[in-house]
């Protein structure tokens, strides 16, 4: 059982009183908690270039861009440089067989722009070549992994979408704009539930996966964090898709569709969202923090981009307060709980039985994204 000293209690009271002044305080606390725990070379999974680190470090990068504090950019660079050798290769270079192992490449663009270090460009070019050769199903959809033949998972749009459109933006490769639009369109068309507007976790175009419906190829459940990755990807892709691109409106429409569906499933009592999104009435279902952070980020970003009416602010504020109120503290460390571990595809009970953890990287990363976007919104995010 954790003990709380008077000093810690007082500190928490002071921090909670800043909720109406700056969510950046909470973002820095979350980042600092893990930076104290892990040196850059020990950030788990150790010796692996993986999205767990990538989403956390994406949040850290946003803190740096908002605060200007170089300890955050230095930590990112130290992690990147640990993984990249002097010739521009990955030190722990297993063959890339899943997009999960490419997502952190989004961190290289700012580093390359700032330093002009050709090692970073070489890694980016190498990953772009891998994407160009990635296997697809009969409709042109990327396999989620090499051992998931013909399967598309919602997570995949986040793992590869922002990287590909950033590469297209910085290095004039418009092919990637079109290819990522194709991926989003296939998911939107084939994975959306007509009744709720939410998207199922996965789809097998060949309909042979154990979990696939024999008529639709869909998995059976709407998993919270998978929908979050899809929605975050769309909002982040819009940062780099040209204003006059013919596909831009379709990305905007897809983003607005999922937001409009999500707000209907926000828990009225707490402001959070559930592990299995559309099963709110089941007492066995539970409120999951990482997806709640991701949805808050998405709605806040859409509002900041003037894609939504200001009335959507009520959903953001309610969710943000709920997440902040769920936090606990161990000394100087901020603790986020009720984070579902990573997961494959299963039935309803499979998702309900998934273990929860504290302060894992994609949970903390989602929290940092939420807090930094809430801060970036400025007055439009005002709690007053």
Image (cartoon, grey):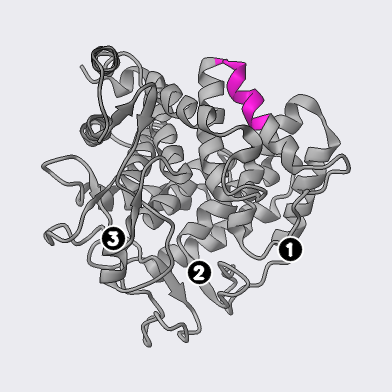
> Residue 198, position in %: x, y?
30, 60
Mark 3 or mark 2, which is nearer to you? Answer: 2
The numbered dot on residue 258 is: none
**Residue at the (58%, 23%) spot, across then down:** 72
Left or right, 90 with respect to 157, comes to: right
Q: Do the CB atoms of the residues marked 3 and 2 lie less than 8 Å apart?
A: no
Residue 14: percent from left, percent from top:
27, 12
Q: Which residue is mark 2?
A: 152
Q: Which residue is mark 1?
A: 95
The answer to which image quadrant residue 30 occupies is top left
* Disc 3 crowd, CA 10 A, few/some/many (<14, 14-19, 20+): some
Q: Main secondary structure of the magenta part?
A: helix
Q: What residue span does the magenta drawing correspond to?
A: 68-77
Q: Which residue is mark 3?
A: 197
Which of the two residues, 247 or 99, is positioned nearer the viewer here? 99
Q: Position of residue 281 (x, y in %)?
A: 11, 59
Q: Secondary structure at mark 3?
A: loop
Residue 359 shows in this picture: yes
Of residues 279 and 214, the one drawn nearer to the viewer in this rendering: 279
Please report whichever mark, 3 or 2, sits nearer to the chain's N-terminal start. Answer: 2
Query: Visible in this render: residue 249?
Result: no
> Is 143 placed left or right of 356 in the picture?
right
The quadrant the N terminus occupies is: top left
């Amino acid at each position: 059982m954790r003990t709380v000293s008077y000093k810690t209690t007082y500190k928490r009271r002071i921090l909670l009183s800043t909720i109406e002044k700056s969510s950046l305080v909470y973002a820095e606390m979350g980042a600092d908690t893990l930076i104290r725990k892990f040196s850059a070379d020990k950030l788990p999974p150790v010796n692996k270039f993986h999205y767990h680190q990538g989403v956390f470090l994406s949040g850290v990068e946003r803190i740096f861009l908002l605060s200007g504090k170089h300890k955050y950019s230095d930590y990112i660079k130290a992690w990147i440089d640990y993984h990249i050798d002097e010739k521009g290769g990955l030190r722990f270079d297993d063959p890339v067989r899943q997009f999960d192992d490419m997502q952190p490449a989004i961190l290289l663009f700012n580093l390359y722009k700032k330093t002009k270090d050709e090692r970073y460009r070489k890694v980016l070019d190498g990953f772009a070549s891998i994407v160009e050769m990635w296997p697809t199903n009969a409709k042109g959809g990327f396999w989620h992994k090499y051992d998931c033949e013909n399967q598309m998972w919602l997570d995949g749009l986040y793992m590869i979408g922002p990287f590909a459109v950033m590469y297209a933006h910085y290095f004039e490769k418009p092919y990637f704009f079109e290819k990522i639009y194709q991926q989003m369109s296939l998911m939107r068309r084939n994975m959306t539930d007509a009744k709720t507007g939410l998207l199922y976790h996965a789809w097998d175009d060949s309909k042979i996966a154990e979990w696939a419906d024999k008529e639709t190829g869909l998995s059976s459940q709407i998993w919270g964090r998978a929908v979050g990755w899809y929605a975050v990807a769309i909002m982040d892709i819009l940062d780099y898709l040209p204003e006059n691109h013919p596909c831009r409106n379709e990305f905007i429409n897809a983003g607005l569709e999922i937001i409009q569906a999500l707000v209907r499933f926000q828990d009225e009592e707490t402001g959070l969202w559930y592990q299995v999104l559309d099963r709110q009435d089941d007492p066995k279902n539970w409120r999951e923090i990482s997806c709640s952070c991701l949805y808050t980020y998405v709605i806040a970003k859409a509002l900041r981009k003037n894609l939504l009416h200001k009335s959507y602010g009520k959903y953001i504020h309610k969710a943000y307060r709920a997440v902040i109120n769920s936090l606990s503290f161990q000394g100087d460390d901020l603790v986020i709980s009720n984070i579902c571990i990573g997961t494959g595809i299963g039935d309803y009970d499979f998702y309900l039985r998934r273990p929860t953890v504290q302060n894992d990287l994609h949970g903390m990363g989602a929290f940092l994204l939420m807090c930094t976007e809430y801060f970036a919104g400025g007055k439009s995010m005002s709690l007053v």
